[in-house]
Image: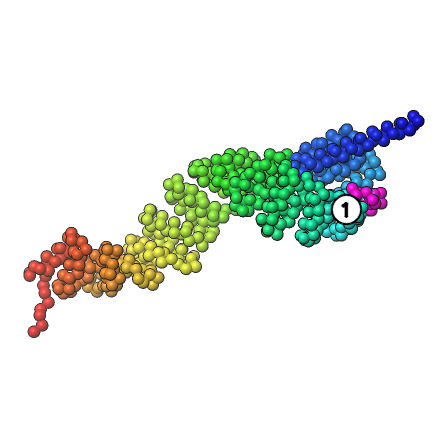
Amino acid sequence: MKKYLFSLGWMVVMSLHCYSQDAEIKNAQLLIDHGKIKSGIDMLQKATATYPEAAQLYYYLGQAQLLAGNQQAASASFDKGFGINPKEALNIAGQGQILLLAKKNAEAKVHFDQALKMGKKNIAVLQAIARAELSDKLMRKDAFTLLEKAKGINADNAHTHQLLGEYYALENNGGSAVSAYERAGEIDPKNGTPWYNIGLIYQRAKLIPMSEENLKKAIKADPEYALAHKELGELYYLKKDGANAVKHHKIYLDLTDSPEKDDMFKYAFYLFLAKDYTQANAEFKKLSDQPDVTSTTLKFYAQSLLKSGDLAESEKIFERYLNHSDTKPTADDYQNLGQLKEKQGKLAEAAVDYEKSLSLDPTQNDVFNTLIDYYFQKERNYSKAAQTCRWAIKSRKRPFSNDFFTLGRSNYFLHKYPQADSAFAKFIEHQPNIAIGYTWAARSKSVQDSLLTEGLAKPYYEKVIQIAEPDPDKYKHDLISAYQYMGSYFLIKQDNKTAKGYFEKVLALNPEDEKAKEAIKLINTPTGVPHKPKKK
């Protein structure tokens, strides 16, 4: 009787230990699902100390360590579990998994066969071997066979269907993968993993609404399922919904104790996308102070500072970005820096950056326009304006008519009249119905024929009159210039009647025009202007 009672007591103790171990494993898995990988590992390590003879705990600890990217620690855990109990098949499967990751497939297969021999009907063992084999394309079919066997033993094991879903996903069989995951979700309705994985499948297929729907299902099943919140943040980023991207990524960060390297950058970037520049700057500042700050972080930090109006600090960070060892400056970079300096009134420095931008990408029409306007209008550097116009004409797929117009005027002010003539001719070719082109062409010709003896400007001013007279209010200044020239031309040719007619037209537009008044007075004075003798 004493022997029986002792055996019964031992069985009760062992069953309680097994229950406690299972609870520890389940709770650790829940922590891992919630993004608390470090906490999950810590819980399993404490469990191994509490139950030092429970060899299976080392298998689950090793799996958590693999998830954390620590393959060496995982290998040590599997070996320790095997040392405690060489008959625990889970750790043998884990050792095979390590060998498989090292591309030692033949040695791994020996371990899998050994584990399978010891646990042919043990679903956990079948799942462990299958999980390992799924990582290798050559052994994937073997994994499927084991999972089908596990399903035959117990068709209502959620984890088996979860692993089957992974198999189908790896085989690019999305429909079967979704069905397997859905079955896992039906069996274990409080587990967010199946719905999360379905969300990923639809995301890869670019079916964003369906992806969003299933990621929300994952959160409904388990509100603290960290990775579902993270993926929802990514999904809302793709939808350009900054506010929701920030919301879900923040929840993920609050849940996880194992953020990935770029998770804090993503949070700052999503804040930037949401136009919360104040908070984005605070997060970017933390990242920029780190010794391993990335060039991408500095780039977006500079842009966020610019958007918030902190121009001086934005320029400093932009310079740090350009000088970062990983930065290969692009045309956009120099364009942005040029705009930043332009807003601060540093126009000359901005022009240098715009030129650097165009040297990398000479197809930027807006940058050419900005640079041409700066040199011609603001700086009145006609030599640089002409140079930039020629650069633009050569670079654009279709030169702008204004390129020729500004080139012509620049050459005019540089006293390069033949070059000005050529440019104005091109402008007129592009804009034959605009008076201003003929006006400037006429001005250039007038300088080259200052005594009006050849009448070089006459055909151009005649064209101005033809275009402008139907709308004198719009073309008033062009018409006045044309009428004055024509009046002067005919005055020199001693055709006073025609000359007077043109000067009267000047006065009709501008009664206070002194030159026209003086010319008419001269014409009306009999001794003032010699008249051509009348024919007999």
Considering the image in quadrants, where does the C terminus appear? bottom left
Residue 356 in percent (x, y) is at 44, 48
**Of residues 362 and 366, the one drawn nearer to the viewer in this rendering:** 366
Quadrant of the rendered image containing residue 407:
bottom left
What predominant SS class does the magenta segment belong to?
A: helix
Residue placed under numbered mark 1 in the picture: 155
Q: Can residue 522 be seen in this view?
A: yes
Question: On screen, 396 above or below 235?
Answer: below
Residue 186 forms part of the magenta stretch? no
**349 relative to 506 in the view: left or right:** right
> How busy is the neighbourhood of tag 1: few (under 14 within 10 Å), some, or many (20 plus)?
some
Residue at image point 10% right, 65% down: 531
Outermost residue, left direction?
526
Residue 327 in percent (x, y) is at 53, 44
Q: Which kind of residue does numbered mark 1 sit on? A: Ala
Residue at image point 12% right, 63% down: 496
Magenta range is: 112-125
**301 relative to 82 in the view: left or right:** left
